[in-house]
Amino acid sequence: MRHGFVIGNTDGIGLALTRRLLAEGWAVTGMSRRPAAVEHDRYVHVAADVATPEFPPSLARALDAAGGVDLCVYAAGVGDLLDPDDLAAQTRVLEVNLIGAARAVEVVVPRMLAAGGGHFIGLSSLADTLITPVAPGYAASKAGLSSYLIALGAALRPRGVHVSTVRFGFVDTKMAKAPVRPMMITVDRAVDVLMRCVRTRAAVVSYPRRMAVLTAALGPVARARARLGSR
Ligand SMILES: NC(=O)c1ccc[n+]([C@@H]2O[C@H](COP(=O)([O-])OP(=O)(O)OC[C@H]3O[C@@H](n4cnc5c(N)ncnc54)[C@H](OP(=O)(O)O)[C@@H]3O)[C@@H](O)[C@H]2O)c1
């Protein structure tokens, strides 16, 4: 039986993906701060905060208990908007979205290499090309995550380990906070895209395509505006 890990799965995309994997016959281990949002005989939940030092050993123990990992999806994320009087919140966004993912890679990938294969998917964002004074930590975390995972994927592919960077636009979860959310997709649609990525192991998935074109075009404009000091 294939075994998938979903990190960040008590809500949103991670929760819907967990349910889909279970429905398709996978065994799943989920990790989040809150208790399990899923009950199933093929599901194991581990309470963990990816921004704490306990996260890597806790993930290592869960991987050992599972006896192998075919797929690991890093879906943990936070998207706090900027409050200039609380920059610690921006640091926390970087810790959860970027450093937590790097720590997961550090624990999971050696096991996949030892097993001769595996698939790591990171949920980045189309915001990875933007500089936005509204959510500087979020955009920076996604820029770093995409850059890291795309490069890592190129390095690991010859050794049988696939790394996918999935870049969504707006997905209808509590994370999507912007007042205007063009081309927003449902969580089910996002899971369809992820399941296709599980099958194809594509290095980069950008969805929706038209939104990807739009954000790529907006990137230089956003940079210029930020340099000029306008929001
Ligand atoms: N929704 C969008 O529009 C959108 C667009 C592009 C990319 N994404 C990315 O997709 C991923 C999932 O987003 P979502 O929309 O599903 O968000 P969500 O509904 O807010 O869910 C976030 C998940 O992350 C977990 N999480 C947050 N902080 C954590 C921590 N410190 N340790 C462990 N787990 C933590 C949460 O569980 P607990 O609270 O139980 O810890 C929750 O299960 C994120 O990386 C996000 O940036 C989302």
Image (spheres, rainbow, N blue to C red):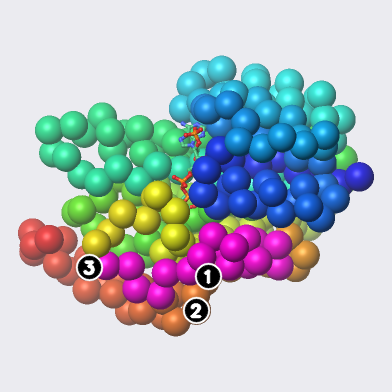
Kindly check if marks 3 and 2 are in contact, taking CB atoms under 8 A apart as contact.
Answer: no
At 48% from the left edge and 21% from the top edge, which residue is drawn? 52
- State the quadrant of the N terminus: top right
Residue 75 on image: x %, y %: 55, 46
* Residue 206 tag number: 1
Name which quarter of the figure residue 87 lies in. top left
Q: Nearer the viewer, residue 87 or 228?
A: 87
Amino acid on which the number 3 mark rests in the picture: Ala
Quarter location, residue 228 = bottom left
Residue 187 covered by magenta stretch: yes
Distance from disc 1 to disc 3, alpha carbons, whole Å, reads: 19 Å
Q: Position of residue 208 (x, y in %)?
A: 49, 75
What percent of the width, then of the height, locates residue 122? 58, 51
The secondary structure that dominates the magenta segment is helix
* Three-letter amino acid code of the residue under disc 1: Ser
Q: Nearer the viewer, mark 1 or mark 3?
A: 1
Is disc 3's CB within 8 Å of ligand 1?
no
Magenta segment boundaries in residue numbering: 180-197
Tell me the kind of residue under disc 2.
Arg
**Residue under circle 3?**
222
Q: Choose the circle earlier in sequence order: 3 or 2.
A: 2
Which label belongs to residue 209? 2
* SS for callout 2: helix
Residue 149's place in the image compared with 210, above or below, is above
Residue furthest to the front in view is: 39
Query: Could you tell me if residue 173 is visible in this image?
Result: yes
Within the image, what quadrant is residue 182 found in? bottom left
Relative to 30, 221 lies left or right: left
